[in-house]
């Protein structure tokens, strides 16, 4: 029995709206999205892109192999800078994953229609970013093969993890975040997997997609259970947007290091995470929109709304920068004051002022609707924000550690070639997974877009 469709829906054609192009019917949406997976195949640009991603992934494998053989001494970390690129990358990748959860869960609960075209690949982006983030604390341990020591499992020695350690908090936060995000993403895929199964012409594709569709037939009972599961997972995922990066910020705030011991870090980190996350959604959405001809599904309203979200969270981050500087001088603590002055005028001043330029000044262009509605400019701005957010994490970690309380313990951090290889290699892992996702799974939710067509057409005809 094929997937059930609403009665008379084939006769409905949705008019143009701000979230959907003109003239789409129930069937045309299904044809256009499913054809990307089933019939379109891969073009030359896709092949070049995945080849570059695989080359970077090879660099990551090489870097990890050398790290396992020699140790963390291949990195630039030293005393006093015991945290370097690894923790910077960890916080950056976790932040990128936050927009997917926000779009999927929070906007679903708020009944925002414009999320429909971007939620699927934003959710996938979350999973791939968390996969990239999760490996860095483990690699930074020095003995990553003993990672299971962080898990609270019974053993004969009676040794348990140190629950006052932020590293253990990260294990629980990231694993919970990854689990809920994976379930939410997969549950949302089930109706579309059934559609691909029913439209596939090759037997092995029918079998594979059928296995993952879990016997979906589109019955009323299936839809009822699906909606209950979706709302339940959305309710679980929404607080995770706040809690996970709050826990990550606790890695810093529980320390007495100048620049870290601050109550502003939890909201500061959460806003920064959503900021960089939406920047990554834009960086992915605009090329996909152009390459696959999805202008009818990813309309200017989507582009504009994502620009507005990036502007709003960017202003919160800018406010955090101002308040961090203000509170250091207002509090009168000489170590905090020196930390701020060292950021602005010390050996890493170039990082600080570059960060201010690309993360605070340049994004002010988003106040202009012409910039927000220009895909090329918005795409360029998204890379500006990504660069700025990575530099922000680098600045927070390095400038606070390299000069703390005692001048005799001061030192400099100089990244090595292996720091850069593993950083860019993690990007290779992310884009390899993303390229495979858009090749084998529908990047836009078919059933949600069909539901949008149905509702838009009914509203027009009522």
Image (cartoon, grey):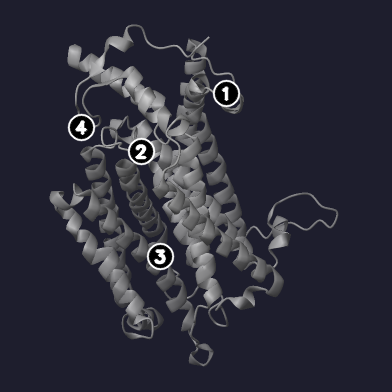
Q: Is residue 242 above or below residue 180?
A: below
Number of the front mark, 4 or 1: 1
Mark 2 and mark 3 lie on one chain; the one further toward the N terminus is 2
User: Element under label 4?
Assistant: loop
Find residue 9 and report its image quarter. top left
- Residue at x 48% of width, y 64% of height: 424
Find residue 297 and report its image quarter. top left
- Circles 2 and 3: CB distance less than 8 Å? no
**Residue picked out by circle 1:** 206
Mark-to-mark CA distance, 4 and 1: 35 Å
**Residue picked out by circle 4:** 18
Q: Say the numbered circle drawn on residue 118.
A: 2
User: Element under label 3?
Assistant: helix
- Circles 4 and 2: CB distance less than 8 Å? no
- Circles 4 and 1: CB distance less than 8 Å? no
Residue 430 at x, y = what percent? 49, 53
Query: Given the current orientation, which residue lies at the most extreme front position?
Result: 44
Mark 3 and mark 4 lie on one chain; the one further toward the N terminus is 4
């Amino acid at each position: 029995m094929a997937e059930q469709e609403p009665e008379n829906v084939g006769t409905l054609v949705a008019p143009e709206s701000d979230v959907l192009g003109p003239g789409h019917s129930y069937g045309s949406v299904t044809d256009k999205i499913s054809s990307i997976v089933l019939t379109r195949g891969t073009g030359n640009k896709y092949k070049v892109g995945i080849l570059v991603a695989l080359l970077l992934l090879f660099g990551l494998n090489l870097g990890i192999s050398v790290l396992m053989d020699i140790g963390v001494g291949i990195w630039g970390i030293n005393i006093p800078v015991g945290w370097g690129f690894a923790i910077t990358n960890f916080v950056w990748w976790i932040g990128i994953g936050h927009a997917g959860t926000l779009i999927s869960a929070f906007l679903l609960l708020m009944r925002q229609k414009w999320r429909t075209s971007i939620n699927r690949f934003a959710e996938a982006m979350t999973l791939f970013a968390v996969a990239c983030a999760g490996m860095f604390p483990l690699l930074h341990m020095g003995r990553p093969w003993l990672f299971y020591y962080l898990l609270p499992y019974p053993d004969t020695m009676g040794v348990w993890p140190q629950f006052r350690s932020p590293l253990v908090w990260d294990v629980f936060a990231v694993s919970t975040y990854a689990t809920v995000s994976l379930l939410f993403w997969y549950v949302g895929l089930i109706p579309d997997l059934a559609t691909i199964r029913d439209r596939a012409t090759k037997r092995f594709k029918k079998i594979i997609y059928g296995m993952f569709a879990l016997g979906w037939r589109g019955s009323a009972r299936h839809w009822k259970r699906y909606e209950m599961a979706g709302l339940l997972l959305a309710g679980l995922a929404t607080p995770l947007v706040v809690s996970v990066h709050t826990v990550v910020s606790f890695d810093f705030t529980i320390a007495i290091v100048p620049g870290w011991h601050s109550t502003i870090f939890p909201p500061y980190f959460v806003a920064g995470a959503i900021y960089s996350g939406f920047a990554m959604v834009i960086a992915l959405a605009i090329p996909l929109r152009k390459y696959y001809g999805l202008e009818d599904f990813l309309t200017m309203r989507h582009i504009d709304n994502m620009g507005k979200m990036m502007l709003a969270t960017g202003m919160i981050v800018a406010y955090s920068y101002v308040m961090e500087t203000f509170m250091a001088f207002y509090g009168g603590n000489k170590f905090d004051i020196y930390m701020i002055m060292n950021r602005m005028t010390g050996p890493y001043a170039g990082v600080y002022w570059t960060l201010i330029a690309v993360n605070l000044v340049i994004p002010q262009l988003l106040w202009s609707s012409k910039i927000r509605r220009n895909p090329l400019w918005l795409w360029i701005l998204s890379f500006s924000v990504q660069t700025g957010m990575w530099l922000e994490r680098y600045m927070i970690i390095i400038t606070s550690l390299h000069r703390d309380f005692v001048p005799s313990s001061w030192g400099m951090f100089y990244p090595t070639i292996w720091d850069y290889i593993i950083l860019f290699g993690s990007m290779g892992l992310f884009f390899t997974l993303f390229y495979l996702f858009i090749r084998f799974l529908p990047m836009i939710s078919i059933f949600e877009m069909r539901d949008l067509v149905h509702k838009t057409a009914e509203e027009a005809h009522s």
